[in-house]
Image (spheres, rainbow, N blue to C red):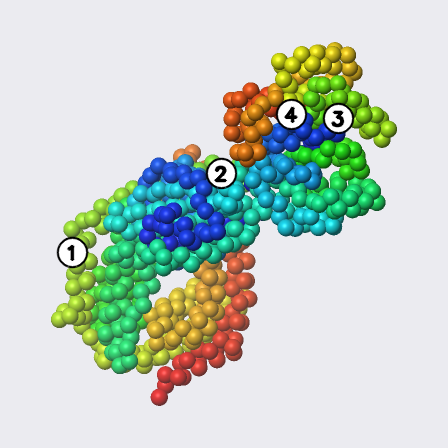
């Protein structure tokens, strides 16, 4: 009990038993020990290992979620529903501390096995409990194991608490186990499972040709697309489709932006192939986005118009299920497999794509040329925007910024971490605002399309049209405000400070 | 949040089962869900001993009770949920000066208890067996004062003395909850005294009686309160009954 209770935990490799700790505990000794029955456990994480990357470990056992972090006591909360995404978790201490994790991604088992907990009273020479120790053994089927040793202090026994936590941290050698950070649990227990990286780092050693690098980028992103297929088919979460599409978008970017690296004919063929594959995914993504924004839409209009929204979103949900099933079928089909194989084969040794006139250009020069040109176009476009400029120019700017962003990301290994960050930051800020402006435009257009396709005689369509009418009015107002915001931040992007940073890097490539 | 309540276990005589009562009542209070602090104000320091709590070195200093944080730091969690102990280890000399300090500072005890008692629902005070400035302050601070009485003619007199003290110092007798302690049913002196005191007096004894028990006597050996070590024993059962009566009076 009490305000002064302290807790700390340390993770050790291997299955550490009480007997292994006796020496470390001195001058205290082991009092009563209680062993709990073995239960199955799962180590949960997102597909991209976000939990592990933020230095945490999330364990599920018999309706309890336990979250481990370095430098903080473990927290737990009970869950009586199947755990899906972090966003859908009921409020509680675990949800509150899952900070670095996407609310949209599914929490999936990265490792599983059996868990066994021992609770030990640590006592002094008068057999008074001075601290409580819990040893949680996590054993995987393949013998990989760790022990989570948690110390709980008792009020008034701070010395014992400190002594024990220090001893546990030093335990390493004597038991053959070593202390590991919670973020490493995933790696230890699921050894062999590769970690997904949606932004693969492309090798660009000195002297690489543009052709080489372009091929490597395409191959890497094809692999990213392929890895996301299962998640789309099993509908684990909406991010799999999103990243599948981004991977293809980047492939199409390379093909278009690296002008002259592939022949025109090859470029057109690649655009057609990837265009076909992308087209299959567009509608599902649109619907996912609608459904993700559902709460926002309801907030924008008064309750009297919610009936129309309920009808609209019920339609979206039904259509979404059908689209997801159709896409899953497509991804499982032999036609799809054949198309992907064809694409992949094109980028293997002996079969390479048809090179263009600039294929042998050293990649450093290509990078400087492309980024230079893209940056100047984006800047010129931004500079001519004022309150009177038509919206199309804003959309143009968004497209140019996107191209610049992709180029910067592709060539990040050449730019180097230190130079990269100051270039990407102002660009990202501008893109966020441009993106929001674009979202509003797209939403308005799309919603108006729904009204147009509805019938003025059906009750449902009338209710929907009414709600959409109110929605588009609000969205329009937001768009206008957002436009002003965009105008307001252009100065930073076009200003001398950012210009100096870009020009400095671009000029470094000349001569 | 409900206000903290204070129960004092007091007797002007030693050896009447005061500490045994304090210890078992505190544990029962903790089990009832109340966050409980047992304060040992008796320099003989037995209640901490029964919980195996060693007094910290911070105690025994002259100005101990004048610092709320020093008091707070000396509190130790028992092995039982919801129950903390403030052990005693004061030399007689320190105790005197402590009393002197109290005389000048009126209800210092109340202030100290309020701050050390933050976060507790109930404070149980195991009082020293004398009438003094400290006792007077305890009487003022406590919501209820539980008084073990061994049913002999001598005990009757000490109870009279206590009443006289209360009257003289304008303290409410209603706070007093005397109960018969260490009762030996085979002794006719005991049964007769009990009968007479229950029927004659204007003071109301609690209905529950605590029997003399070797189990209670041997608490010092096992260093576990009897309600935990031998819950089915007559002694333990009677403490449970006693606690229930007191609990109702607290409400």
The answer to whether marks 3 and 4 sit on the same chain is yes
Residue B175 shows which numbered tag? Answer: 3
Direction from residue A405 to residue B192 in the image, left or right: right
The chain letter under disc 2 is A
Cα separation, mark 2 vs mark 1, equals 46 Å
Residue B187 horizontal/vertical position (percent): 65, 14
Q: Residues within 10 Å of mark 4 (few under 14, many from 20)?
A: few
Looking at the picture, how far across and down is residue B59, in whole percent? 67, 48
The residue tagged 2 is A306
Residue A321 image offset from top left, x and y in percent: 32, 41
Q: Which mark is residue A338?
A: 1
Q: Is residue A97 visible?
A: no
- Between label 2 and label 3, give the one nearer the viewer: 3
* Residue holding disc 4: B247
Disc 4: host chain: B
Q: Position of residue B56 (x, y in %)?
A: 62, 48
Picture layout, residue A424 above or below residue A450: below
């Amino acid at each position: 009990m009490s305000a002064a209770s302290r807790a700390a935990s340390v993770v050790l490799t291997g299955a550490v038993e009480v007997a292994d700790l006796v020496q470390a505990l001195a001058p205290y000794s082991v009092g009563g020990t209680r062993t709990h029955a073995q239960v199955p456990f799962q180590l949960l994480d997102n597909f991209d290992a976000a939990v592990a990357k933020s230095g945490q470990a999330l364990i599920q056992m018999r309706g309890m979620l336990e979250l481990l972090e370095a430098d903080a006591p473990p927290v737990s909360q009970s869950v009586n529903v199947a755990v899906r995404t972090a966003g859908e978790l009921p409020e509680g201490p675990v949800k509150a501390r899952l900070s670095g994790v996407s609310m949209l991604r599914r929490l999936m088992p990265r490792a599983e096995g059996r868990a066994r907990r021992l609770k030990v009273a640590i006592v002094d020479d008068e057999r008074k409990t001075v601290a409580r120790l819990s040893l949680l053994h996590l054993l995987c089927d393949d013998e990989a194991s760790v022990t989570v040793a948690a110390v709980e202090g008792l009020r008034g026994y701070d010395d014992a608490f400190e002594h024990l936590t220090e001893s546990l941290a030093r335990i390493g050698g004597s038991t053959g186990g070593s202390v590991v950070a919670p973020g490493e649990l995933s790696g230890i227990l699921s050894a062999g499972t590769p970690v997904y990286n949606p932004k693969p780092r492309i090798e660009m050693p000195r002297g690489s040709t543009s052709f080489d690098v372009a091929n490597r980028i395409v191959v890497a992103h094809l692999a990213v697309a392929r890895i996301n297929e299962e998640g789309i088919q099993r509908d684990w979460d909406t991010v799999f489709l999103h990243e599948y599409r981004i991977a293809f978008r980047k492939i199409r970017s390379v093909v278009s932006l690296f002008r002259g690296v592939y022949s025109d004919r090859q470029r057109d063929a690649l655009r057609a192939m990837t265009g076909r594959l992308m087209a299959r995914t567009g509608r599902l993504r649109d619907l996912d986005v609608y459904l993700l924004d559902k709460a926002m839409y309801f907030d924008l209009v008064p309750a009297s118009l919610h009936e129309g929204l309920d009808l609209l979103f019920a339609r979206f949900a039904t259509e979404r299920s059908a689209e997801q099933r159709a896409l899953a079928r497509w991804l499982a089909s032999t036609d799809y497999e054949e198309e992907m194989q064809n694409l992949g084969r094109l980028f293997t040794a002996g079969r390479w794509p048809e090179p263009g006139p600039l294929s042998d250009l050293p990649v450093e020069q290509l990078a400087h040329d492309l980024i230079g040109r893209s940056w100047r176009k984006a800047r010129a476009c931004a500079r001519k925007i004022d309150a009177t400029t038509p919206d199309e120019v804003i959309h143009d700017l968004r497209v140019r910024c996107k191209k610049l962003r992709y180029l910067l990301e592709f060539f990040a290994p050449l730019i180097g971490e230190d130079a990269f960050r100051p270039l990407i930051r102002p660009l990202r800020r501008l893109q966020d605002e441009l993106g929001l402006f674009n979202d509003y435009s797209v939403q308005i257009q799309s919603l108006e399309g729904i009204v147009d396709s509805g019938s003025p005689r059906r009750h449902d369509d009338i209710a929907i049209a009414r709600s959409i009418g109110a929605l588009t009015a609000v969205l329009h107002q937001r768009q206008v405000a957002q436009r002003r915001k965009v105008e307001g931040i252009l100065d930073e992007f076009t200003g001398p400070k950012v210009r100096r940073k870009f020009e400095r890097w671009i000029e470094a490539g000349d001569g | 949040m409900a206000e903290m309540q204070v129960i004092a276990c007091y007797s002007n005589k030693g050896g009447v089962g005061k500490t045994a009562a304090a210890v078992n009542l505190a544990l029962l209070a903790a089990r009832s869900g109340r966050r409980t602090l047992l304060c040992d104000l008796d320099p003989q320091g037995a209640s901490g001993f029964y919980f195996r709590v060693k007094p910290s070195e911070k105690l025994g200093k002259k100005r101990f009770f004048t610092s709320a944080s020093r008091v707070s730091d000396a509190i130790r969690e028992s092995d039982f949920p919801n129950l903390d102990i403030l052990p005693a280890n004061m030399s007689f000399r320190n105790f005197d000066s402590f009393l002197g300090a109290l005389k000048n500072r009126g209800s210092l005890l109340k202030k100290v208890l309020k701050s050390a008692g933050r976060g507790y629902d109930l404070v149980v005070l195991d009082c020293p067996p004398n009438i003094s400035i400290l006792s007077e302050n305890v009487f003022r601070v406590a919501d209820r004062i539980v008084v073990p009485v061994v049913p002999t003619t001598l005990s009757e007199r000490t109870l009279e003395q206590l009443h006289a003290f209360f009257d003289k110092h304008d303290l409410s007798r209603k706070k007093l909850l005397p109960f018969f302690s260490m009762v030996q049913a085979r002794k006719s002196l005991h049964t007769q005294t009990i009968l007479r005191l229950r029927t004659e007096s204007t003071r109301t004894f609690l209905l529950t009686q605590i029997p003399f028990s070797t189990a209670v006597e041997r608490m010092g050996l096992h260093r576990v309160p009897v309600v935990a070590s031998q819950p089915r024993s007559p002694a333990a059962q009677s403490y449970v009954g006693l606690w229930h009566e007191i609990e109702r009076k607290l409400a």
